[in-house]
Amino acid sequence: MSPYRIATIDGDGIGPEVCQSAARILSEACGSALLDFVRCDGGAAHYARTGQVLPDDTFALCRDSAAILHGAAGLPGVTYPDGTEVGNDLHLQLRFRLDLYANVRPVRLWQGVKSPLAGWQAGQIDYVIVRENTEGLYASRGGGINLRGEVATDTIVVTRKGVERVARFSFGLSRKRQGAPRDGKRRVTVCDKANILRSYAFFRAVCEEVAREHEDVEIDYAYADAMTVHLVKRPDFYDVIVAENMFGDIISDLGAATIGGMGLSPSAELGEHHGLFQGAHGSAPDIAGQNLASPLATILSGTLMLHWLSERHGDERLAVAARRIETAVGEVLAHGDAVPRDLGGTASCTEVTEAVLRRMARALD
Ligand code: ATP
């Protein structure tokens, strides 16, 4: 039996193509004896058929596996009676039920990819957004009030425990990195609106307390509105950014846009005992089933999974495999072997996958 069982939820739209591409590459890099991908149901189409977006047996498999790999979920028009999207509920349920409190979103400009920001080169944009994933404004999910169709409210939730753990995670992450590209300084930037709301002032104060345990890492602050300017004008200043749930959601899409888009942006959602890995993009129904999607975000999410498993289990083989995939992706992008459509090329999902596999094979020769 393979030591690491990976619960694999393809989902909807482009989910199956990108998820199976990533599983193929991860299997190749690790060998089939190391990873066991077990496919399970879930998503908006599954809900339309059965009334369940996350079936009980899928949840149990996710809970009891070493990690979860997910494509994407969501279909236009498949909504709950309150108007919210069914697809999003798949990972939201996993997030809340498995307590995946740190949503890690690396923003890195790869060689060969042109940033829409003029003049920035590979290596100059390289930071990580850590989005608090289990509370903030989205903790109100399903709990807000719509009164008589006249008044609607949602409440932000910020707890000491929630902020402490995501702040500790962020400072710990900065310690493992090389610092900001601009000056090599290890830095955690707290993104909030502490000037307006008490909940954000509390978020900031707790981060400040945690910073005192990490004096080798600089603490820095930015209001969320100013942050949208900074990420465009001086992205090289950032190392790790920690943000409340909704702000993290918003600024990570902005960050992704600066390095080539959502098709190149991986994501890891981590808790103490579980990890869920998926590209930062949605199910892209406009291009689904046509072999047009870029699998790179999901492949890179797979490498985050291997690094996480490697660290958790002290298994260096997984980290070696992750680096092999990252090198191959880097070469495909740098040499333009197969440029996906969202990066201005014409390569299909299959062609990008094959190109990464070819580079991996060449490295072994
Ligand atoms: P969600 O709300 O679920 O995050 P979304 O509505 O923001 O999803 P996406 O599904 O991410 O949107 O798609 C936004 C646009 O980006 C679409 O035009 C889609 O075709 C494109 N896109 C998203 N992911 C990819 C990908 N992996 N490869 C190519 N194009 C993509």
Image (cartoon, helix red, strand yellow):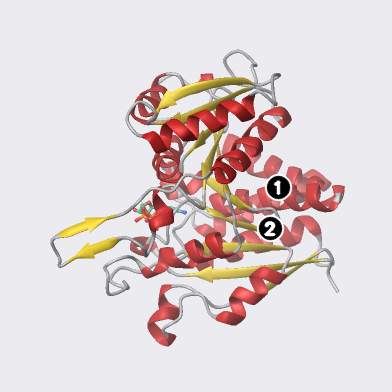
In the displayed structure image, the side of residue 302 where residue 200 appears, left or right: left
As drawn, the label of residue 325 is: 1
Query: Is label 1 within 8 A of ligand 1 (CB to nearest ligand atom)?
Result: no
Residue type at mark 1: give it: Ile
**Element type where label 1 sits in the image:** helix
Q: Which residue is mark 2?
A: 25
Q: Which residue shows up at 49% across the image and 30% down it?
A: 204
Residue type at mark 2: give it: Ile
Could you tell me if the residues under marks 2 and 1 are in contact, i.e. CB atoms within 8 Å? yes
* Quarter of the rendering containing residue 37: bottom right
Q: Residue furthest top?
A: 183
Looking at the image, is 122 positioned above or below residue 254? above
Residue 16: image location, x then y, percent:
52, 68
Q: Earlier in the sequence, mark 2 or mark 1?
A: 2
Q: Does residue 290 appear in this view?
A: no
Q: Which residue shows up at 39% across the image and 41% down it?
A: 250
**Element type where label 2 sits in the image:** helix
In the displayed structure image, the side of residue 143 where residue 164 appears, left or right: right
Q: Does residue 86 appear in this view?
A: yes
As drawn, the label of residue 159 is: none
Label 1: few (<14), some or many (≥20) within 10 Å? many
Label 2: few (<14), some or many (≥20) within 10 Å? many
Distance CA(mark 2)–CA(mark 1): 8 Å
> Of 25 and 36, which appears nearest the observer?
36
* Quarter of the rendering containing residue 170: top right
Q: Which residue shows up at 46% across the image and 57% down it?
A: 293
